[in-house]
Image (tube, helix red, strand yellow):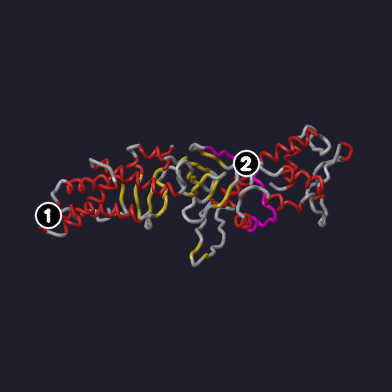
């Protein structure tokens, strides 16, 4: 919030429509506003007293605020030079994102959204109000320049992420937004809670939760499951459906694969290993699978693998109890409250899958 916007909000709440620092009631209202924004009351009120003259009843003549047409080119709106100082006192935020917003919008001071927006520990839908939609769209594809650190590029920024950052951090929502592009952090933090940002055309489709090529443990488990399944299909004369593998599969494919795993488990692999050494490797892989997952049926095995994979991936971002939000350019947003308890539903196998090493999940069917 800029200094001008702070004064405007203070004026709206004052009894007479314009505040006075000589009026204890008006000062109390100002303190409440600053507390709502988590701004330092004792630092800002003296600054206002020093740098801004608040008119009294006798001093007001005509309109309280001059229009742009009424200002001479050399006039500087009251407190304009201190706007950046006031913005910098808002807790949280990203200096890099702030500069990007100023550059994209062509302004010296970041405008504040005209409304407050919901954020709660639930799954909910929110819509950008018409007054804020132009800036939302102007920032939709804004991205900071990529920089390298120790030879590694920083994580990119997806469509709508800067729009969302601006909408909540520079608004009446009382949400402090920080960027979280380091390591496995979610894209943003709202008051410390992780928010992973997506921009798919539909909230109801399967949304990607990222690639898993570096997730060695789960990748090995999937390789064992589908490796044994492929071996069984080849032995059985069924060499079709070659697209089913550790990087491309559905929940149903996991169930089918575990049918073959269980069939192999029922074979005396120790005896076969004495005749064919390759069966010794197969037994080691089956034993590894049994040590990592608890199951007695194919469906239980598939559920155990799916839940482990999803939990490991979602634990990193956005984190259990945090949010993934899907944004649309028209301003429609759906915040999904990610909870591991929801993954216990057996229907999870119908809602997940993998394509080209990217895990996908239908968040609407899973989290509401």
Residue 62 position, x and y percent, is 85, 40
State the residue in front, 146 or 263: 263
| Number of residues whose C-alpha sits closer than 10 Å to that of mark 1, classed few (under 14), some (14–19) or many (20 or more) | some
Q: Residue at x 37, y 40 (%)?
A: 343
Q: Residue at x 56, y 48 (%)?
A: 164
Residue 80 drawn above or below residue 299: below
Q: Quadrant of residue 280?
A: bottom left
Q: Is residue 365 visible?
A: no
Q: Is residue 347 visible?
A: yes
Residue placed farthest to the right in the image? Answer: 58
Residue 299 position, x and y percent, is 26, 41
Q: Which mark is residue 272?
A: 1
Residue 293 position, x and y percent, is 29, 45
70 on left or right of 97: right
| Number of residues whose C-alpha sits closer than 10 Å to that of mark 2, classed few (under 14), some (14–19) or many (20 or more) | some
Let me know if residue 110 is in the magenta part: yes
Majority SS type along the magenta span: loop
Residue 51 drawn above or below residue 30: below
The residue identified by callout 2 is 174
- Disc 1 versus disc 2: nearer the observer: 1
Q: Residue at x 16, y 56 (%)?
A: 279
Q: Which residues are magenta?
A: 101-120
User: Separation of disc 1 and disc 2 at Cα?
Assistant: 67 Å
């Amino acid at each position: 919030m800029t200094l001008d916007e702070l004064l405007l909000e203070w004026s709206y709440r004052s009894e007479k429509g314009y505040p006075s620092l000589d009026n204890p009631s008006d000062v109390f209202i100002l303190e409440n506003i600053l507390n709502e924004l988590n701004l330092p009351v004792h630092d800002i009120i003296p600054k206002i007293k020093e740098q801004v003259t608040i008119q009294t009843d006798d001093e007001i003549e005509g309109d309280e605020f001059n229009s742009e047409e009424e200002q001479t080119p050399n006039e500087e709106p009251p407190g304009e030079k201190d706007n950046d100082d006031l913005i910098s006192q808002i807790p949280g935020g990203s200096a890099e994102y702030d500069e990007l917003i100023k550059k994209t919008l062509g302004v010296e001071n970041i405008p504040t959204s005209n409304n407050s927006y919901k954020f709660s520990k639930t799954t909910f839908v929110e819509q950008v109000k018409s007054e804020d939609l132009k800036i939302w769209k102007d920032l939709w594809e804004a991205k900071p320049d990529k920089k390298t650190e120790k030879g590694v590029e920083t994580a990119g920024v997806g469509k709508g992420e800067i729009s969302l950052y601006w909408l909540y951090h520079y608004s009446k929502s009382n949400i402090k937004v920080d960027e979280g592009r380091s390591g496995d952090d979610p894209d943003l933090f709202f008051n410390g809670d992780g928010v992973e940002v997506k921009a798919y055309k539909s909230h109801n489709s399967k949304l990607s939760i990222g690639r898993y090529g570096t997730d060695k443990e789960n990748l090995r488990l999937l390789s064992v499951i589908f490796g044994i399944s492929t071996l069984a299909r080849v032995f059985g004369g069924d060499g079709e459906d070659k697209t089913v593998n550790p990087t491309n599969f559905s929940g149903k494919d996991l169930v089918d694969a575990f049918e073959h795993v269980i069939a192999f488990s029922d074979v005396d692999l120790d005896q076969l290993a004495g005749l064919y050494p390759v069966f010794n490797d197969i037994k080691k892989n089956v034993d590894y699978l049994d040590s990592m997952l608890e199951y007695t049926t194919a469906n239980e095995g598939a559920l155990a693998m799916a839940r482990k994979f999803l939990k490991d991936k979602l634990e990193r971002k956005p984190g259990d109890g945090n949010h993934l939000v899907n944004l649309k350019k028209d301003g429609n947003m759906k915040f999904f409250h990610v909870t591991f308890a929801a993954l216990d539903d057996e229907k999870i196998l119908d809602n997940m899958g993998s394509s080209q090493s990217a895990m996908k999940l239908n968040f609407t069917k899973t989290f509401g």
